[in-house]
Image (cartoon, grey):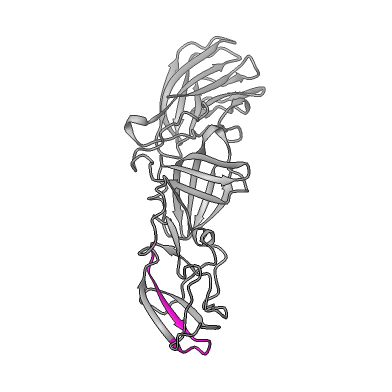
Amino acid sequence: MATTLFASIYLPPGMQLCDSNGDPLNGGKVYVYEAGTTTPDTSYPTYTDALAGTNANANPVILDSAGRAQIWLQAPRLYKIVVKTSADVTIQTVDNYSPAVASAMPAASEWVREVNTVAYSSATMFNITGGGDLTGSYYSGCRVKVVQTGGTVGGTVVTSSYSSPTTSVRVRLDGGISLNAGLSEVYLSLLSPANGAGYLPAYEDPPSAVEATIATTQAITTGGYRLIQFDTVALDIGGEYNAGTYRFTPYMQSSFASWSQRYLFVVQIKLQTSITSAIVAIYKNGALLVETQVNAGIANGAINVSHIVTATGGSDYFEVYVNPSANVTVVGGVSGSRIQIARLQ
């Protein structure tokens, strides 16, 4: 996990560093390296900065006339500390120094702050830059909380993906709240469900409900499956339906068998003229999922189909197609063809 639980000060308040004569190390220098190397590492002027990984000290840190300085280190980590005079004469070298060893453990907390760089990406996604592939920590179903404009909000990870050097995390915030550009902090819960449990709906989650119609009419030609263009959205609580691509992409998707996300589709196709038959089909990810054939096309009558679909892939999407026995016009408007979708919990 790429998070830091706490930080510790290298020089407790009032402590001085002295030279070999016992005099305060006026203007002395404290170099911070990665343990066992001469690769410069980072220290911070305050506890808050150390936790956040911001506002780093210069390296070396220059001591004041009393041989004091504010040097905070992230814990638990290992460092090499080299203390020198103002003339760069080495006074002391401490390798494999752990600031956690002599530190009081912080109070137990469910939440662990992400110390890598976090940034707003969209209303449903934030990015973490640095720390390598963090998808194993931000897995589907784990709980997070974010600090952004408007306050702190809890949420659940839907999916995550990694493309070096960034891990992108798609979340569902409690109460239907969206991420915003004021995002500044992200915390990961230690009490999340086990990896593999998938997305478990929380009681704060709003219902998923969609209703879409065709604005006027749609001409359908025979000879194959034709996508129904439900282009007018009457209801979409979760922002899951795209009226430009005519696709429904469920926000909640899970690979955990006991909690697979299921959605009820109710489709009404109203024809302007009578034809011999028509097949109404639901497609999943561009492939036929289920179809129903109706062998009676009554002018201005409706073909009604209902089916329960399962969303498991994290990016599954669904569409409605029709395959008529002859060219036909599909009626739109408020009393015409429509699709209604609701999540079953």
Give the x, y percent position of residue 210: 55, 25
* Placement of 38 over or under 260, stated as above or below: below
Q: In this view, does 57 lie above or below 319?
A: below
**Which sits in the foreground, 97 or 157?**
97
Q: Which of 286 and 224 is in front in this view?
A: 286
Residue visible at 47% across and 17% down? 305
Question: Tag count in the figure?
Answer: 0
Q: In terms of depth relative to the viewer, which is nearer, 304 or 141?
A: 141
Instruction: Please indicate, yes or no, whether residue 163 appears anywhere in the rendered image.
Output: yes
For the C terminus, the quadrant is: top left
Q: Can residue 4 be seen in this view?
A: no
Residue 203 falls left or right of residue 36: right
Image quadrant assignment for residue 191: top left
> On the picture, is 323 further left or further right than 313?
right
Residue at horizontal 59 percent and vertical 13 percent from the top: 273
Residue 79 lies in the magenta stretch? yes
Q: Give the range drawn in magenta.
A: 76-90
The N terminus sits in image quarter? bottom left
Q: Is 61 rendered above or below residue 334?
A: below
Location of residue 90 (image quadrant): bottom left
The one of 39 and 141 positioned closer to us in this rendering:
39
Magenta region includes residue 316: no
User: How far across and how far down the image is residue 219, in percent?
Assistant: 61, 24
Residue 177: image location, x then y, percent: 57, 36
Q: Position of residue 199 (x, y in %)?
A: 41, 36
In percent of the image, x 45 and y 31: which residue is there? 202
